[in-house]
Amino acid sequence: STDEDVAWSFVVNASFGRSTSHDVKLTPESVDAVFDSIGDGTPRAHSAAKMGFGIDQISSSGDSFLVAAIKKNNFKLAALIVKKCTNINYRIKSGDTALDLANRKKQNEITELLRKHGAKTSEEIKSEGE
């Protein structure tokens, strides 16, 4: 996907002496475009992560944004996502968590980062009965 293929609709919050918050959901096409941009050399995924867009959304293939970053060996993006995501232990279709994937891919930096933020393997989750 390219930027021209996807209609991007972002809400900009301005501060006028009070605090406001808006939940913004990207369209499925926009979510997939952000996921597709991981590792393609464009700043789209990093920009989305910095703003919090798409962080806890799931792509059409069933991956979380964090899992997609790990699949692309993108430590910098994974670090941004970990700071903002609310479900670090999301399980993909296979039942694996982001930590399972990082361990299997021998991505030690990402594994350490995930552990520091409370990530668990699918086996740990199973043993805890979650």
Image (cartoon, rainbow, N blue to C red):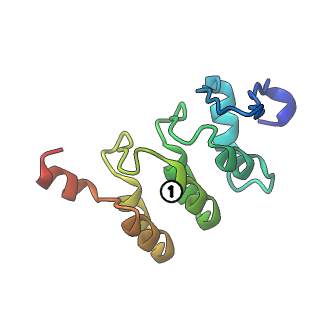
The answer to whether residue 16 is left or right of residue 48 is right
Q: Residue at x 37, y 44 (%)?
A: 90
Asked whether residue 92 appears in the rendered view, the answer is yes
Image spot of residue 97 (x, y percent): 36, 52
> With 67 as the anchor, is 30 left or right in this view?
right
Q: Is residue 119 above or below residue 13?
A: below
Query: Is 16 situated above or below 46?
Result: above
Residue depicted at 56% across the width and 42% down the height: 55
- Number of numbered discs present? 1
From the viewer's side, name the closer residue of 80 and 111: 80
Q: Which residue lies furthest to the right in this view?
A: 4
Residue 5 % position (x, y): 82, 27
Q: Where is residue 17 in the image (x, y as percent from the top left)?
A: 73, 34
Instruction: Find disc 1 in the rendering and name its residue.
Output: 82
Mark 1 element type: helix
Q: Specify the quadrant of the image occupied by residue 93.
A: top left
Residue at x 40% of width, y 51% of height:
88
Q: Quadrant of the C terminus?
A: top left
- Most extreme residue toward the front is 17
Location of residue 111 (image quadrant): bottom left
Task: Quarter of the image for the N terminus: give it.
Answer: top right
Amino acid type assigned to the residue bearing label 1 in the image: Val
Badge 1 density bin: few <14, some 14–19, many ≥20, Cα 10 Å: many
Residue at the far bottom: name it: 108
Confirm whether residue 104 shows in the render. Answer: no
**Vertical relation: 35 (above or below) 16:** below
- Rendering quarter of residue 99: bottom left
* Nearer to me, 85 or 100: 85
Is residue 105 found left or right of 121 in the rendered image? right
Q: Looking at the image, which residue is at 49% across and 47% down?
A: 85
